[in-house]
Amino acid sequence: MPDEIPRKLFYRLNEVCQITDTQPYVLRFWESEFSQLAAQRSRTGQRLYRRKDIDLVLAIKRLLHEEGCSIASAREQLGMPDQPGTMESLFEPPRSASPPPDRAARTVVRELEEILRLMESTDRRLGGRRDGHH
């Protein structure tokens, strides 16, 4: 990262990548995950960032890469609300859909017991073949 960021009203995507030492796909992804990071568009559709966007990119990068925060944790530390529909939320079931812990535990136990029964029946069938019994 250069010692001093040039003073401009807007910075193009490749300039921001150079200043922050990030890749274009990373910036585009972060825009989808951090609502405050929103590039404006030029008439030709090119992404244009302001100085505050560069500062935010540097803060996000520090939190994610240097401090090892998750995206949700970085969002929280930056004072951003949770964002439903982000990539991270695609991998988490909705909280309301989770059964209570005791019910969930019983379900897991039942499923594990079923798996054991299937494995035992498979072993018996395979064992019979190995012994020459059909």
Image (tube, rainbow, N blue to C red):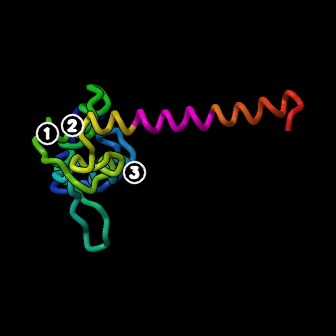
Q: Quadrant of the N terminus?
A: top left
The spot of residue 15 in percent (x, y) is 31, 49
Of badges 3 and 2, nearer the viewer stands: 2
**Residue 117 located left or right of residue 130:** left
The spot of residue 81 in percent (x, y) is 13, 47
> Residue at the location (19% across, 53% down)?
35
Pointer 2 and pointer 1: residues touching (CB < 8 Å)? yes
The stretch of residues the image draws in magenta is: 108-119
Residue of label 1 = 78
Indicate whether residue 46 is drawn in magenta.
no
Instruction: Tell which of 30 and 41 is nearer to you.
Output: 30
Residue of label 3 = 25
Instruction: Please tell me whether the stretch drawn in magenta is mainly helix, strand or loop.
Output: helix
Pointer 3 and pointer 2: residues touching (CB < 8 Å)? no
**What is the secondary structure assignment of the residue under circle 3?**
helix
**What is the secondary structure assignment of the residue under circle 2?**
helix
The spot of residue 52 in percent (x, y) is 14, 47
> Residue at the location (18% across, 43% down)?
56
Residue at far left of view: 79
Instruction: Please tell me in which quadrant of the rendered image residue 124 appears.
Output: top right
Vertical side of 5 occupied by 87: above or below: below
Q: Residues within 10 Å of mark 1 (few under 14, many from 20)?
A: some
Which mark, residue 74?
Answer: 2
Instruction: Tell which of 71 and 110 is nearer to you.
Output: 110
Using the rendered image of the protein, determine whether residue 1 is visible from the camera's viewpoint.
yes
Say whether disc 3 or disc 1 marks the residue closer to the N-terminus: 3
Residue at far right of view: 132
Indicate whether residue 111 is drawn in magenta.
yes
Q: CA distance from mark 2 to mark 1?
A: 6 Å
Which mark, residue 64?
Answer: none
